Image: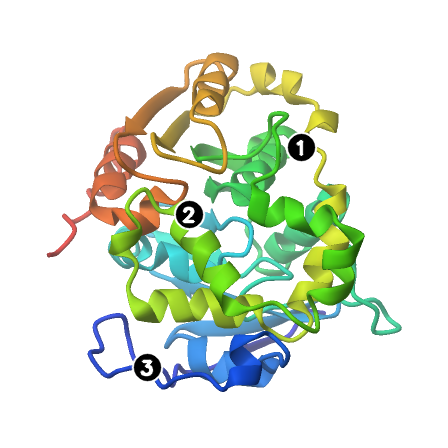
Amino acid sequence: MASIECRSSNISGPGSTAPLPRRPLAARLGITSVPRDELRRRYAQSGSKFIRIMGADVHYVDEGSDQGGGIIVMIHGFASSLHTWDRVADELKHAYRVIRLDLPPFGVTGPLRSSTGAIETMNLPTYRRFIDTFLQALGIARATFIGNSLGGLISWDYAVRHREAVERLVLIDSAGFPMRLPIYIGLFNSALVRASSPRWLPEAIIKSAVRNVYGDPRKIDALTLRRYVEFFHGEGTRAAIGKMVPTLDFAELDTTVLSTLTVPTLVLWGAQDRWIPPAHGAEFTQRIPGSKSVMYPGLGHIPMEEAPERVLADLRAFLSADAGKTAVPALAG
């Protein structure tokens, strides 16, 4: 049986003006890794919980209450974390029960491990087993799914496999159609990079990748950038990514099943997405019957993090479209 543990956050929030301490040289070069317990101490939130699934303590946040509004499950993308939903979740939790998690091998969660302690390969079948187990452990029988990038793929795949369990579907710059991997991910298809990255991967490369997913890199604050770096340098994460990336062959996915979905669907996309072509947003909209789409000029691959107020406005309208749904308060600030 899965066990659930609550932890409190010990880090400063995004509004903190305190300067960040400089990381040691070995840490900046990626020669050392950040221990899991240190990541937990720095990046767990006040509502953080942990549940043991498939050899890992999975980090998640479960906020708000299901009192007519329903349940929302938010799933982040490659090398991201549940923190990417912070501003949006802070508003939606007033009207919905909002669940977001750190997918393995990312965030505070880190890699899944076998009974022998070996790092599991996070291919689609493994993610299917993982997300099914996670939702069953939390007793989630039906929910709205909001997924970004890799999380979008996991979300629409879940909707295909569990049609009665998905109330609504929101795909934000979702993966799914054949594409060339972004250069920062494709590097891990090199055997040399896979072998060397757990022992040496300068933070400058990670920072460059994070800036690349924003439409306007100037919007990234120092704390957010530091969080991405330390999660990527987390203990076991780079080795897990090295095992994962060679399995990312979107050409093998059966996207013809999208035309059989009947769930209300909203497709959101950053027009400046450099990781997944905006044309893929149009393709999702065309294939999923009755789906609606919004394109955001100037935004990149993670619009809900880059401009949460713009994304929230469209989410609010979509989620409250049915009669009797509770209105979501306007985003402050």
Q: Name the residue under label 3.
A: 20
Separation (CA) of disc 2 from disc 1: 33 Å
- Of the two numbered discs 2 and 1 on the same chain, state the one appearing first in sequence: 1
Q: Position of residue 218 (x, y in %)?
A: 25, 54
Could you say which is closer to the camera, residue 107 or residue 215? 215
Picture layout, residue 273 above or below residue 127: above
Q: Nearer the viewer's eye, disc 2 or disc 1? A: 2
The residue at which mark 1 appears reads as: 161
Left or right: where 124 falls relative to 77: right
What's the coloring here? rainbow
Could you say whether the residue bearing mark 1 is in a helix, strand or loop? helix
Q: Which comes before the other along the chain, label 2 or label 3? A: 3
Question: Mark 2 belongs to which amino acid?
Answer: Asn
- Circle number at residue 169: none
- Which residue lies under the disc numbered 2? 212
- The local crowd at label 2, few if under 14, some if 14 to 19, many if 20 or more residues have their Cα within 10 Å, is some
Residue appearing at x 64%, y 25% in the figure: 178
Query: Distance from label 2 to label 3 (Cα)?
Result: 22 Å
Query: Residue at the location (35% across, 34% down)?
Result: 272
